[in-house]
Image: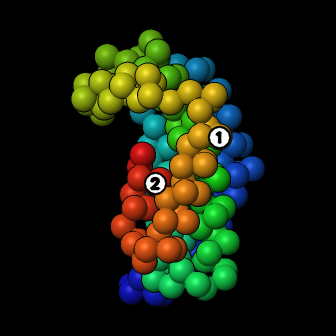
Amino acid sequence: MKCSEMPYSRVDMDEVKKFFDTLIADSKNAESGEDQLRLHKKYYKFMSDVYTNIRLGVFRHNIDTTEEFYSKENDYIDEITPLISQYVNEYNKTLFESPYRPYLEEKISRVAFKNIELRNKSIDEKILPLMQEENALISRYDKSSGCGDLYTLRVHG
């Protein structure tokens, strides 16, 4: 499928919040490592869809920064990516503190848990407005300079 044929849909933050609230609650109540891993696979699938739509929105905006629809979508993405990062971080804390962590480290990897530990130290709810402002500044720079390569900072940073 060509990129231009891929359907884009706006990330629904109510849906994201509901997903993470349920995922975190279910993860805290997991009865085994296998149960925890099954939930983690749902996380992978959900986040794959979320990030695909974020990347599509940013990519299409970067193709033509004057196009109104994707310009507004890009602004929305600037606002939501720090919030999504916070939800991911909260879920990762649940994984990190899981009584099934040894099983998960074996199945997922120890490196993943080291990355979770580092990420836990790098994100705090207090800095979310600053992260949103940073995203908006990057977008403003992208529009004025014609550089579209900085979106990686927002999606992954």
Residue 51 to residue 69: above or below: above
Measured Cα–Cα span from mark 2 to mark 1: 16 Å
Count of picture labels: 2
Question: Looking at the image, is 75 positioned above or below residue 19?
Answer: below
The residue labelled by disc 1 is 129
Residue that lies at the very extreme toward the right in this rendered image: 14
Residue 115 point in image, percent of width and height: 32, 30
Residue at 59 percent across and 32 percent down: it is: 127
Q: Quadrant of the rendered structure where residue 26 is?
A: top right
The residue that mark 2 highlights is 155
Residue 56, can we see it? Answer: no
The x, y position of residue 20, in whole percent, is 63, 38
Quadrant containing the N terminus in the rendered view: bottom left
- Residues 74 and 93: in front is 74
Q: Nearer the viewer, residue 86 or 92?
A: 86
Residue 43 at x, y = what percent? 50, 43
Q: Is residue 74 above or below residue 132?
A: below
Q: Nearer the viewer, residue 157 or 144?
A: 144
Q: Amino acid at mark 1?
A: Pro
Say which element carries label 1.
helix
Where residue 139 appears, x then y in whole percent? 53, 64
